[in-house]
Amino acid sequence: MAILQYSEQLANMTQQPKRAKSDNEATPVAIVTGGSKGIGEACVEKLLSQGYDVYNLDIVPSKVGNFVEVDVGRVADVEAAIASIATQTGRIDVLVANAGVYLSANIEDTTEEALDRIISINIKGAYAAVRAVLPSMKEQKKGSIILMSSDQAFVGKKT
């Protein structure tokens, strides 16, 4: 349910027709984590088509948007990258926290290292990205944050 709601929000936000900018109006800035493939890449492409300056934070190189190599599972790296983008652009209008991984294994077969990786990327990565964009959005008194999830949040695996 929540996934559909966020997908609809992103669709509604980006379906508005492009409008001509005045000379003194800044280009809106969007950050997408995990934007090099799949749904993240589609988000980058859609935001670009709507006139956003898009920064893709990922470990997988991409030619779509402004690629910034960041391991989203490392909180300090995410915060530093977003701080740099905010300083460079002077604004952050949209965050799509999309990066995520899943493990298709029974709990008995899940190592602590695998669990740590999942928590680092899926939870700490989203936390770091949201925390890092808040100062810019508060200063602007506006901004949109979209937190993606997958059906893995709702589906169990039989053991």
Image (cartoon, rainbow, N blue to C red):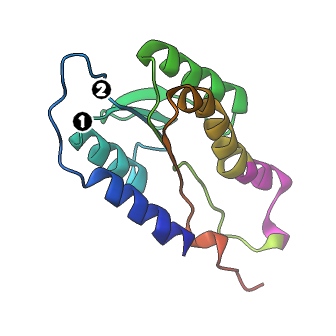
Which circle marks residue 27 in the picture?
Answer: 2
Residue 128 rendering spot, x and y as whole percentages: 68, 37
Q: Which residues are magenta?
A: 108-119
Task: Determine the image quadrant of residue 10.
Answer: bottom left
Q: 52 or 59: nearer the eye? A: 52
Q: Amino acid at mark 1?
A: Gly
Task: Provide the residue designation for mark 1.
Answer: 51
Check the image and report above or below for 138 versus 108: above
Residue 126 rendering spot, x and y as whole percentages: 64, 45
Q: Give the secondary structure at mark 2.
A: loop
Check the image and report above or below for 16 versus 19: below
Asked if the stretch drawn in magenta spans residue 99, the answer is no
Write the residue at 34% across / 52% down.
13
Question: As drawn, is 13 to the left or to the right of 71?
Answer: left
Majority secondary structure in the magenta region = helix
Instruction: Evaluate whether residue 33 shows in this view.
Output: no
Whether pointer 2 and pointer 1 mark residues with C-beta atoms closer than 8 Å, the reply is yes
> Callout 1: 10 Å neighbours few (<14), some, many (20+)?
some
* Quarter in which the N terminus is drawn: bottom right
Write the residue at 58% across / 53% down.
100
Write the residue at 57% across / 62% down.
149
Residue 84 rendering spot, x and y as whole percentages: 54, 17
Q: Amino acid at mark 2?
A: Thr
Q: Give the secondary structure at mark 1.
A: loop
Question: As drawn, is 61 to the left or to the right of 95?
Answer: left
Q: CA distance from mark 2 to mark 1?
A: 7 Å
Instruction: Evaluate whether residue 145 shows in this view.
Output: yes
Check the image and report above or below for 24 versus 108: above
